[in-house]
Amino acid sequence: MPAILDDEGIDAWLNETNTEYRGVLGAIRGISADEMMMYPVGAYVNERERETPECVEPIRNFYSAIRE
């Protein structure tokens, strides 16, 4: 499950001087399944030097790609 954060929580979470995780635990909030969207992404996201919009683009379902 991802950590769902508001803007302040994101800043605190990514702050390089923050070495104590307990300081940002309060910024994590729950989210209902209705608010979330889930879709498969490609192996492209596994390369740590890749931080591009393509990382979050959905890939086509394998079976639908075969039918085309």
Image (cartoon, rainbow, N blue to C red):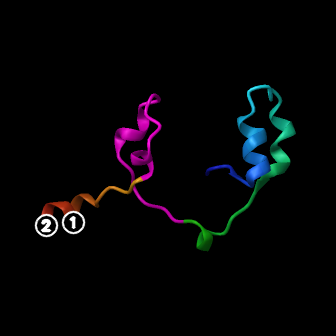
Give the residue at x 44% y 41%: 52
- The x and y percentages for residue 48 are 47, 29
Q: Which residue is mark 1?
A: 64
Span of residues in magenta: 37-56
Q: Quadrant of residue 15?
A: top right
Q: Quadrant of residue 67?
A: bottom left
Give the residue at x 48% y 62%: 38
Q: Is residue 15 left or right of residue 39?
A: right
Element on which disc 1 rests:
helix
Vertical arrangement, residue 24 with respect to residue 65, above or below: above
- The x and y percentages for residue 64 are 21, 65
Screen quadrant of the C terminus: bottom left
Say what amino acid the circle numbered 2 marks.
Arg
Q: Quadrant of residue 13?
A: top right
Element on which disc 2 rests:
helix
Say what amino acid the circle numbered 1 marks.
Ser
Mark 1 crowd level (few <14, some 14–19, many ≥20, 10 Å Cα): few
Tell which of 52 and 26 is nearer to you: 52
Q: Is residue 39 magenta?
A: yes
Report the number of discs.
Answer: 2
Mark 2 crowd level (few <14, some 14–19, many ≥20, 10 Å Cα): few
Give the residue at x 66% y 69%: 32
Tell which of 2 and 48 is nearer to you: 48
Q: Which residue is mark 2?
A: 67
Vertical arrangement, residue 61 with respect to residue 21, above or below: below
Q: Are marks 1 and 2 in contact (CB under 8 Å)?
A: yes
Q: Pick out the residue farthest to the bottom.
A: 34
Q: What is the magenta segment's predominant secondary structure? A: loop
- The x and y percentages for residue 41 are 39, 51
Q: Which mark is residue 8?
A: none
Give the residue at x 28% y 61%: 61
